[in-house]
Image (spheres, rainbow, N blue to C red):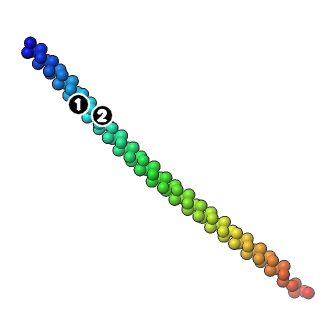
Amino acid sequence: MSNFNDKSDSARRRAQNHFAASEQRDTLVRKEIEKERAASDAKIVKLRALRLAKEAADEAAAEKLAAEKKLEDKTKAAGKLAARKKPSPTA
């Protein structure tokens, strides 16, 4: 009877060891997946910040260009108006 109990205990120990090893592998895999997700999330946040900064810089440059063009148009219009008001030298 003792021999049967020894075999049973041995089989149970092997199964528990196998199960414990499987659980350890699962835990390591889950931790590795979490690390990869965290790295990916950090990369996404960094890229999003860079994109938003670029969009803001592009918008500021476009506004500056529009303001310069508006000033240039006003300067041209003022020059044309001044040219019209000058009396001709032949008169």
Tag 2 residue:
26
**Neighbour tally class for label 2: few under 14, some 14-19, many 20 plus, Cα within 10 Å:** few
Q: Which mark is residue 28?
A: none
Q: Residue at x 26, y 34 (%)?
A: 24
Instruction: Assign a secondary structure to mark 2.
Output: helix
Q: Residue at x 45, y 53 (%)?
A: 46
Q: Is residue 53 left or right of residue 85?
A: left
Where is residue 65? Give x, y as percent.
Answer: 64, 66
Tag 1 residue:
20
Whether label 2 touches label 1, CB < 8 Å: no
Where is residue 12? Give x, y as percent.
Answer: 18, 22
The single residue placed furthest to the left in the displayed view is: 2
Where is residue 1? Give x, y as percent.
Answer: 9, 12
Q: Residue at x 39, y 43 (%)?
A: 37
Residue type at mark 2? Asp
Where is residue 19? Give x, y as percent.
Answer: 24, 28
- Quadrant the C terminus occupies: bottom right
Q: Quadrant of residue 58?
A: bottom right
